[in-house]
Amino acid sequence: MACGIRLLASEKDFGAALPPDQIVRFEQFIASIPDDHMYLVETALSVPQLVVTTRKTISRLTAAQVEKIALFGIAEELRARIVNAYCKATSFDMANSWGKIVRTVCDEFTAEETREVLMAAAKNAQIRGSFEVSRVLENIRKAGRLLEGELETLIKAATEKTSAEVFDDDIPF
């Protein structure tokens, strides 16, 4: 299957000549792609017959699966999945897992994706309280996707504690 997907990606006319049942087999493979073949996800995005299935697969990827994909020059769909999953983190573990990926690829983000991550860090207590947030913010600063004034304003908002967090402690009184 891996060779077939690479062939489809390199020879656009070849995919158009395939019978529908063969396309279905490729779609089924992409829909339930094994972890050791995650590197094919971005290649499958360049095959017109597999784009819809590949986008659905990307929308379900876990942080561990995304880590198995080469993350250089990443596709828009994959960046969107990373940003969306990080911004919607519902636990510290989730924020830390996706945060590791965000800090690795934030130099690939657009300015808008960078803003989304910073605004989520300001609003989402799971992100703000995660161990990875400081490294994410540091790498975003280094990536230089935003103007300095805007960047500092968003980072300040992401690092300030809310009034509930200031008064939240474990001391029972």
Image: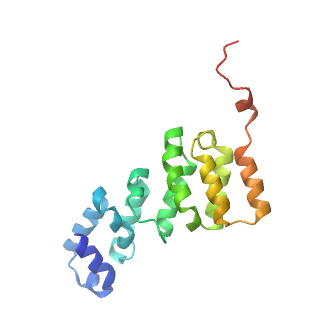
* Residue 32 appearing in the image: no
Q: Quadrant of the C terminus?
A: top right
Q: Where is residue 104 in the image (x, y as percent from the top left)?
A: 52, 59
Judged left or right of residue 57, residue 172 is right
Q: Position of residue 57 (x, y in %)?
A: 37, 59
Q: Where is residue 98 in the image (x, y as percent from the top left)?
A: 50, 50
1 and 68: which one is in front? 68
* Residue 58 appearing in the image: yes
Name the residue at 54% across, 56% down: 102
The quarter of the displayed image where residue 43 is located: bottom left
Name the residue at 62% across, 39% down: 129
81 and 173: which one is in front? 173
Name the residue at 73% across, 54% down: 154
Query: Vertically, is 165 above or below 38?
Result: above
168 and 138: which one is in front? 138
Q: Where is residue 20 in the image (x, y as percent from the top left)?
A: 22, 75
